[in-house]
Image (cartoon, rainbow, N blue to C red):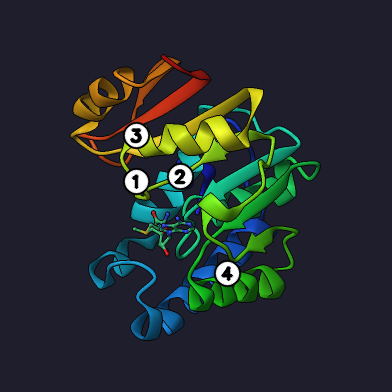
Amino acid sequence: MTRQEIGLASCDVSRETIERLEHYERLLSKWNPRINLVAKSTLPDFWTRHVSDSAQLLDIVAPQSSWVDLGSGGGFPGLVIAILCAETSPQTTVTLVESDRRKSVFLQTVIRETGVAAKVICERIERLDPLQVGILSARALAPLPKLLEYAERHMDRRGTAVFPKGENWENEVSAARAVWKFDLKTVKSKTDPKAVILRIEGVERV
Ligand SMILES: C[S@@+](CC[C@H](N)C(=O)[O-])C[C@H]1O[C@@H](n2cnc3c(N)ncnc32)[C@H](O)[C@@H]1O
């Protein structure tokens, strides 16, 4: 597996990182029938649908000291980011927020068995004290107006949010503009021609 195959233009990926990702794939396949971490149909496409789709965020935002992934589910994008940052940006602390207990146990198992230094918070986002993070991510969690509510509460004033979004992204941006002011950059997804990554800063209520 080359770094291009993983979808990373800007960092090297060692044998150790590939082995961690391969172990993650094995655990995901083993646990998925019991707790439905990802759609079964996407398991054969683990490297593109999940790893590359997550890894491309690192070409859009440089890791800072804190990265929080909300609604991580089976670990996308947050756990892939944690595995990649373990090698390329070890000063980054990655935190995964997931309210489902069984999914949180899965995430903790992958973290323990791969030896990466990520943290899991098993709690509803709404119940957390403000996290003050530098980078916030969330994939397939909620429509943009709701994500911006989370961003306003949990992101540092100079922080950056990266939200992968599907083909309906323009409608979500319009709905969000009615309630929120924010600086937006859109980047085409490398894994889905209809999808984009929204890179957002400066979130304030209108
Ligand atoms: C559709 S899944 C997406 C999972 C993952 N981000 C992905 O793209 O594969 C949404 C996840 O967010 C979690 N979730 C939903 N609402 C949440 C909340 N308010 N607080 C914490 N986790 C939440 C769910 O338990 C679920 O695992």
Asked if the beta carbon under badge 1 is closer than 8 A to the nearest atom of ligand 1, the reply is yes
**Residue 190 appears in view:** no
For image coordinates 52% across by 33% down, the residue present is 151
Where ligand 1 lies, by image quadrant? bottom left
Residue 111 x, y percent position in the rendering: 66, 68
Residue tagged 4: 107
Decide: marks 1, 3 in contact (CB < 8 A)?
Answer: yes
Distance of label 1 from label 3 (alpha carbons) = 6 Å
Is residue 25 placed above or below 10 in the rendered structure? below
Is residue 156 placed above or below 14 in the rendered structure? above
Q: Quadrant of residue 50?
A: bottom left
Q: Is residue 43 left or right of residue 203?
A: left
Distance of label 4 from label 3 (alpha carbons) = 25 Å
Query: In what element is the residue under mark 1?
Result: loop
Residue tagged 3: 144
Residue tagged 1: 142
Distance of label 2 from label 4 (alpha carbons) = 15 Å
Callout 3, which amino acid?
Leu
Q: Quadrant of residue 15?
A: bottom right
Residue 79 x, y percent position in the rendering: 57, 57
Decide: marks 1, 2 in contact (CB < 8 A)?
Answer: yes
